[in-house]
Amino acid sequence: MPLPPLSSDEDSTLTERVYSALKDAILAMHVRPRDYLIIGEVAKHYNISRTPVREALILLEQEGWVENEGRRGARVTVPSVKQVIDVIEMQAVLEGYVARRAAEMLLDQDVQELSDILTRAEEALDRQEFDLSAQIGDQFHDTLARKVGNQRIAAQIIQLREHMDRVRPLVWKVAKAPVAESTRQHRQIWVAIADRKPLDAEQLMMKHTSWFEAELAMVLEIV
């Protein structure tokens, strides 16, 4: 199976570098659900000992990316509908809070920066660059969380979205219309933030996240 090279980040341990490489492979679908990651094979691929691979797989198991199956190795998990919905509901709570705090505390230049991000997403949508528009939409969420300033929440939101990245393409694959709707909803959230309406911003963000849940449930019935 194709595995990405280990990063050259000298500030990271070998275990952390193996963990990042394997997670990247899972997110890119180079290692697919139900595939096995065998400790010996991964160690041989990277020409390293088994210990950092074993430790990396433990980290991946703790985050729900793989299941330990003993001697057979670690199997990449297949997210169930319930697991996906659980993640989305956690996102709704966390990101709703972030949107509310953004409306309460962001400076005018921060609000303008968010608008500029959305403008780029809207322009990409007009050019029918749907994947790019969706990626820029993620930047909107990330920038909101970062500017609110709670690093733990920001990190948790990113981790939750990484899990969603494995199923998100199913929605975009069936139809491109959800990208346009998502972009429209982002602008509505921004307006509530710009107008300093915390409760409206929170409710719109939670509605935005729940809307994606409904889209996903419909798609999972199709595929």
Image (cartoon, rainbow, N blue to C red):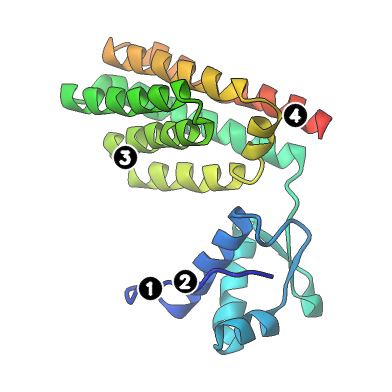
Q: Which residue is mark 3?
A: 146
Q: Residues within 10 Å of mark 1 (few under 14, many from 20)?
A: few
Vertical placement of residue 7 versus 102, above or below? below
Provide the secondary structure element on which disc 1 rests.
loop
Amino acid type, callout 1: Ser
Vertical placement of residue 38 versus 141, above or below? below
Q: Nearer the viewer, mark 1 or mark 4?
A: 4
Q: Are marks 1 and 2 in contact (CB under 8 Å)?
A: yes
Q: Which residue is mark 4?
A: 219
Amino acid type, callout 3: Arg
What's the CA distance linking mark 3 and mark 4? 31 Å
N-terminal label among 1 and 4: 1
Spot occupied by residue 107 in the image (x, y as percentages of width and height): 18, 25
Q: Which residue is mark 1?
A: 12
Amino acid type, callout 4: Val
| Residue in view at x 82 percent, y 29 percent | 221
N-terminal label among 3 and 1: 1
Q: Are marks 1 and 4 in contact (CB under 8 Å)?
A: no
What's the CA distance linking mark 1 and mark 4? 39 Å
Numbered-mark total: 4
N-terminal label among 3 and 4: 3
What's the CA distance linking mark 2 and mark 3? 23 Å
Q: Residues within 10 Å of mark 3 (few under 14, many from 20)?
A: some
What's the CA distance linking mark 1 and mark 2? 6 Å
Amino acid type, callout 2: Glu
Residue 16 — which label? 2
| Residue in view at x 56 percent, y 82 percent | 46
What's the CA distance linking mark 3 and mark 1? 22 Å
What's the CA distance linking mark 4 and mark 2? 35 Å
Spot occupied by residue 172 in the image (x, y as percentages of width and height): 63, 31
Q: Nearer the viewer, mark 4 or mark 2?
A: 4
